[in-house]
Amino acid sequence: MASSIEADGVWATTEDVRLCESWVHVSHCSVTSNEMKFSHMWRKIHAEFCERSGSSCTKIALSSRWKILNKELGKWRDALAKARDNVRSGENLSDEIMQAQMWFGAIG
């Protein structure tokens, strides 16, 4: 199965999700994650991603995409934390998320 990465260099949302899932699964392995070398970790992430998605993209493509995602996920985490720290009386989770989205848009 050819992926959108191979076809036109654009990552589909499902591919981003699979990459994140693969990264979490490999990097949070309680047995090996603390002792894994960076290159070995990306070999494992690559293998898991390809198995999950049927894609044959390269480790370099995955690593490059992860750098972009990680930066954006960090911005989102920071926006959520800022919104959580600024909750006003009577606001709920929806208000918090909307505030985070506004701050995320301002950051990004």
Image (spheres, helix red, strand yellow):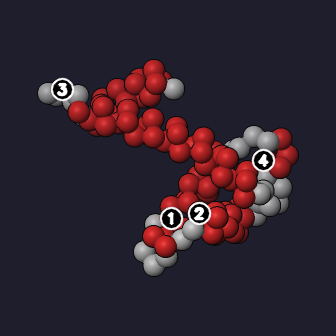
Question: Residue at label 2?
Answer: 38
Image-based side of 72 in relation to 18, left or right: left
**Between marks 2 and 3, how big is the CA–CA gap?**
43 Å
Residue 13 horizontal/vertical position (percent): 63, 45
Disc 1 marks which amino acid? Answer: Ser
> Dot 1, crowdedness within 10 Å: few (<14), some or many (≥20)?
some
> Dot 4, crowdedness within 10 Å: few (<14), some or many (≥20)?
some
**Which residue extends farthest left?**
89
**Between marks 3 and 4, how big is the CA–CA gap?**
43 Å
Disc 3 marks which amino acid? Answer: Arg
**Between marks 1 and 4, how big is the CA–CA gap?**
23 Å
Point 42% across, 74% down: residue: 30
Query: In terms of sequence position, does the residue under pointer 3 or pointer 4 come before the other?
Result: 4
Question: Residue at label 3?
Answer: 88
**Between marks 1 and 2, how big is the CA–CA gap?**
10 Å
Residue 5: give its label.
4
Query: In terms of sequence position, does the residue under pointer 1 or pointer 2 come before the other?
Result: 1
Residue 14 is at least partly visible in this image: no
Question: Residue at label 1?
Answer: 27
Q: Given this view, does label 2 or label 4 mark the residue nearer the observer?
A: 2
> Dot 2, crowdedness within 10 Å: few (<14), some or many (≥20)?
few
Q: Given this view, does label 2 or label 3 mark the residue nearer the observer?
A: 2
* Callout 4 secondary element: helix
Number of marks in the rendered image: 4
Query: In terms of sequence position, does the residue under pointer 2 or pointer 4 come before the other?
Result: 4
In the rendered view, would you say 8 is above or below 61? Answer: above
Point 45% across, 40% down: residue: 74
**Between marks 2 and 4, how big is the CA–CA gap?**
23 Å
